[in-house]
Image (cartoon, rainbow, N blue to C red):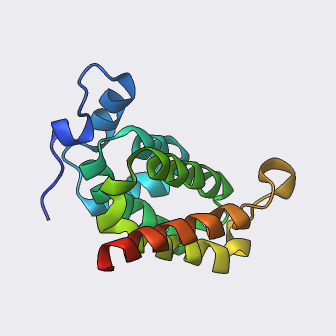
Amino acid sequence: MRLPTEDEINPVPEFLDGQSAVKHFLGKDLEQAEQMFRQAGLVYQEDLMFMGPAAFRFYVQAAISYLRSDSATGDSDMINCFAGVLRFRLEYEADELVPVAEMLASVCGFIVLNYERFDVTPKIYGDLRPRYEALRNCYQRLGESVRA
């Protein structure tokens, strides 16, 4: 699997959020990107929202590896923001997510099943499980649409 190019990370060169994603992710493999999420997931998850679709499909794998790891225990900020990223990407470029739809559905299910380990404070975030269940269903349908 090749690393995303600068144009894939930031398809619109004058886009400042894309420039930030390039600065953070260009030349990083999945292991390096996962380390970034371990160190400051809240900072780097924002880049997932604004990078190009090919780069997103690549680097979301690092975020998912982090979320499935013990290092993500207690990271309620990442869980909250990741739901927003998944909703945003689904709303604006669902077709681009088809190749990773099953993987995204799976991580949504993982988060629901392991929700307590993320120590989400209801007074701050509410209950994120319904959001993740809805996202899981949407991504499952998206993945199934390819097989149909």
Q: Name the residue rendered at 50%, 54% in the picture.
A: 86
Left or right: where does residue 145 sit relative to residue 108?
A: left
Residue 15 image position (x, y, % from top left): 33, 23
In-front residue for pair 138/19: 138
Q: Quadrant of the C terminus?
A: bottom left
Q: Quadrant of the N terminus?
A: bottom left
Is residue 71 something one can see in this rendering?
no
Is residue 110 something one can see in this rendering?
yes
Residue 16 image position (x, y, % from top left): 36, 22
Rendering quarter of residue 104: bottom left
Left or right: where does residue 136 sit relative to residue 130?
A: left
In-front residue for pair 125/148: 148
Q: Name the residue rendered at 51%, 46% in the picture.
A: 88
Compared to residue 94, the image places residue 50 above or below, namely above
The extreme top residue here reads: 14
Compared to residue 138, the image places residue 22 above or below, namely above
Compared to residue 46, the image places residue 16 above or below, namely above
Q: Name the residue rendered at 57%, 77% in the picture.
A: 110
Residue 106 image position (x, y, % from top left): 48, 76
Rendering quarter of residue 44: top left
The extreme front residue here reads: 148
Left or right: where does residue 60 sit relative to residue 91?
A: left
In-front residue for pair 77/60: 60
Residue 131 image position (x, y, % from top left): 67, 61
